[in-house]
Image (tube, rainbow, N blue to C red):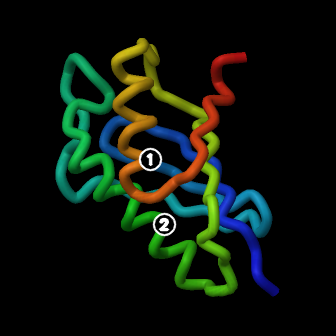
Amino acid sequence: MIRSLDLDVAIYRDRAQVTHRGSGTFIDMRAEFAFSSDARLVEHARYFEDTLVRAMRHILAEGGFSLKEPIAHVVRFDGNLDDMQKSLVETALREIGFHEVIFELDA
């Protein structure tokens, strides 16, 4: 069975949690290289992207995913998500291949 890549993303200090919406597969990935600083949750985009990619690899290892137009839903952000942080998170998710980024915590 081919499933779409539709993920929930929660971002914490030097940690990302990724859940596949269809299967419920959950990955809690600690950053190998710190992406947070005292001032910002996501200070180093490159290290943030690395953490997300490593989490996605665990989910993709199950197989059966279509990589056509993957969607990321940002469902949790530890702290204040100002416009700069929101832009950085969206850019990082798009850089690693997400076609659509939805911020569900805006509601």
**Secondary structure of the residue carrying numbered label 2:** helix
Res 35 → quadrant: top left
Q: How many marks?
A: 2
Query: Looking at this view, is 47 or 33 the one in front?
Result: 47
Q: Is 55 above or below relative to 71?
A: below
Q: Is 72 above or below relative to 38?
A: below
* In the image: residue 48, left or right of residue 9: left
Are the residues at dot 1 and dot 2 in contact (C-beta closer than 8 Å)? no
- For the point 33% across and 56% down, which residue is it? 51
* In the image: residue 43, left or right of residue 7: left
Q: Which residue type carries mark 2?
A: Met
- For the point 48% across and 66% down, which residue is it? 56
Cα separation, mark 1 vs mark 2, equals 11 Å
- For the point 20% across and 21% down, which residue is it? 38
Q: Residue 97: percent from the left, percent from the top?
A: 46, 58
**Secondary structure of the residue carrying numbered label 1:** helix
Q: Residue 61: percent from the left, percent from the top?
A: 53, 84
Query: Looking at this view, is 12 or 74 the one in front?
Result: 74
- For the point 35% across and 31% down, which residue is it? 88
Residue 93 got which mark? 1
Disc number lying in front (1 or 2): 1
Q: Is 105 above or below relative to 66?
A: above
Residue 56 got which mark? 2
Q: Residue 103: percent from the left, percent from the top?
A: 61, 30
State the quadrant of the N terminus. Answer: bottom right
Q: Which numbered disc flags the more N-terminal residue, 1 or 2? A: 2
* In the image: residue 75, left or right of residue 17: right
Q: Residue 104: percent from the left, percent from the top?
A: 68, 29
Q: Is 102 above or below relative to 47?
A: above
